Image: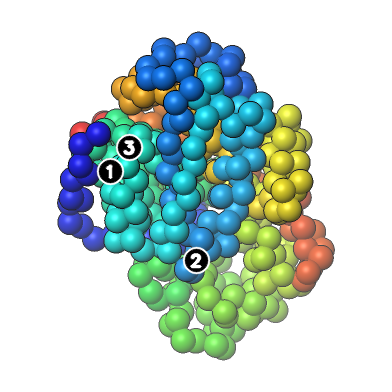
């Protein structure tokens, strides 16, 4: 293994929450080639000692602002590895040696950790919930010809970035397409984005305009942006109602979220139009208060969203038995382990063979049938519509609809690198 090379400079792009705006998804599934299985169900191409370990570096936020998401990912990965190897921890006789590193949500830390692992002969890297980290690890993987499977990091820029980089979670476009399912055709519709006047809020507005507002059949897109310091949110709720939109997309961050949902409910916004937002993790459910049952949610995942399919059941049981709690990003870790096992089944040492095995692979994941698109390594997967029942600590998600992967598939990119 050659010494890892230095990453290129660039601005790290962070995406710490579900990006969700409204547009109909487009695209079609490519033909699949296999279903998921445990180790030994696919023939390997050998390479190295028959019992030599395959070294996998798992980089995620054990500490830092995204530690809760990192924990979900790590718990899912362990359950997925046990499932995909039939509880042996081995693939075709090769033990899978996993070393965990805390990226703390910092790209520089993650790059340093990844270089150290690559220098020690690790040929597979997985993880990160932070988009800024993923966008630094991907070029590093290409420079050193190691397999990299990104985790919950949502930035669309990871898709098609290079042939060595894959993803085990959804991307922002798929969130967008899931939200778009609530409005149908955007032609002639009025869509309003309610957010804060910040980089986060402005990015959501720009995304809606870029995708949903495209001519010639796009929607009319407007926005109401509140100062991040605002605590009295009633005037902004009143502005939303006065605009009489066909759909309101709420992209909100921070401690004022409960006040926002209270204001929207009190001002009658939730009863006068369709209001959509992203369903985050279990800890976020209580913030909607009495408004919970009046909001429509797009969802990447919540326990039960997969309809209790056998793989989802195995994931939930595996995490629970280990003392963990299944949540939003559990499938991202579980799926990463499935992908790694499938890659190793092709070869424990040949990265090119691993890449070829994953390209076009169709398999059953916790969310349902998924496919690695060969052209750009997008992970085509179901997305979900949901509602919340109950309120406060008793709020629980209920599945409204499972959206097929073809409906939410991002446009095909030309592979870089």
What separation in Å lies between label 3 and label 2 (alpha carbons)?
26 Å
x, y (%) of residue 148?
37, 38
Residue 254 appears in the rendering: yes
Q: Which mark lies nearer to you, 3 or 2?
A: 3
What separation in Å lies between label 1 and label 3 (alpha carbons)?
6 Å
**Is the residue marked by circle 1 packed among few (<14), some (14-19), or many (20+) residues within 10 Å?**
some
Report whether 2 appears left or right of 242. Answer: left
Mark 1–mark 3 CB contact (< 8 Å): yes
Is 374 placed above or below 71 here? above
Report whether 210 appears left or right of 51. Answer: left
Seen from the viewer's position, the closer of residues 213 and 368 is 368
**Is the residue marked by circle 2 packed among few (<14), some (14-19), or many (20+) residues within 10 Å?**
some
**Is the residue marked by circle 3 packed among few (<14), some (14-19), or many (20+) residues within 10 Å?**
some
Q: Earlier in the sequence, mark 1 or mark 2?
A: 2
Q: Which mark lies nearer to you, 1 or 2?
A: 1
Residue pointed to by mark 3? 121
Seen from the viewer's position, the closer of residues 119 and 139 is 119
Mark 1–mark 2 CB contact (< 8 Å): no
Q: Residue at x 41, y 19 (%)?
A: 49
x, y (%) of residue 407?
53, 34
**Secondary structure of the residue carrying numbered label 3:** loop
x, y (%) of residue 76?
61, 45
Residue pointed to by mark 2? 63
**Secondary structure of the residue carrying numbered label 2:** loop
Q: Quadrant of the C terminus?
A: top left
Q: Residue at x 69, y 39 (%)?
A: 315
Residue pointed to by mark 1? 119
Residue 168 appears in the rendering: no
């Amino acid at each position: 293994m050659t010494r890892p090379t230095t990453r290129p400079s660039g601005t790290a792009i962070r995406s710490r929450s579900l990006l969700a705006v409204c547009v109909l998804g487009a695209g079609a599934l490519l033909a699949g080639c296999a279903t998921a299985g445990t180790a030994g169900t696919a023939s390997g191409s050998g390479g190295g000692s028959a019992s030599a370990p395959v070294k996998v570096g798992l980089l995620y936020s054990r500490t830092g602002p995204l530690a809760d998401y990192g924990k979900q990912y790590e718990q899912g990965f362990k359950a997925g590895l046990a499932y995909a190897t039939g509880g042996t921890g081995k693939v075709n006789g090769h033990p899978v040696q996993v070393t965990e590193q805390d990226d703390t949500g910092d790209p520089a830390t993650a790059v340093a950790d990844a270089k150290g692992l690559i220098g020690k002969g690790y040929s597979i890297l997985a993880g990160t919930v932070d988009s800024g980290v993923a966008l630094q690890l991907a070029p590093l993987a290409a420079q050193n010809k190691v397999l990299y499977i990104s985790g919950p990091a949502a930035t669309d820029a990871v898709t098609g970035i290079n042939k060595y980089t894959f993803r085990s979670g959804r991307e922002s476009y798929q969130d967008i397409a899931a939200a778009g399912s609530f409005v149908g055709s955007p032609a002639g519709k009025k869509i309003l984005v309610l957010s804060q006047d910040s980089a986060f809020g402005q990015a959501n507005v720009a995304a809606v305009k870029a995708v949903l507002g495209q001519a010639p059949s796009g929607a009319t897109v407007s926005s109401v942006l509140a100062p991040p310091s605002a605590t009295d949110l009633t005037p902004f709720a009143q502005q939303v109602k006065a605009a009489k939109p066909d759909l309101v997309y709420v992209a909100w961050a921070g401690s004022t979220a409960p006040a926002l949902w209270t204001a929207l409910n009190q001002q009658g916004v939730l009863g006068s139009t369709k209001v959509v937002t992203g369903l985050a993790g279990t800890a976020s459910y209580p913030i909607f208060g009495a408004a919970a049952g009046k909001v429509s949610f797009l969802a990447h995942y919540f326990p039960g969203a997969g309809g209790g399919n056998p793989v989802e059941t195995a994931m939930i049981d595996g995490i629970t038995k280990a003392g963990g709690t299944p949540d939003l990003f559990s499938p991202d870790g579980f799926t990463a382990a499935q992908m790694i096992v499938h890659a190793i089944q092709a070869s424990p040492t040949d990265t090119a063979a691993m890449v070829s095995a994953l390209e076009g692979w169709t398999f059953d994941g916790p969310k349902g049938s998924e496919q690695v698109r060969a052209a750009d390594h997008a992970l085509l997967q179901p997305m979900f519509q949901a509602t919340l029942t109950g309120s406060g600590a008793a709020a629980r998600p209920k599945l409204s609809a499972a959206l097929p992967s073809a409906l939410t598939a991002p446009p095909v990119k030309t592979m870089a690198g």
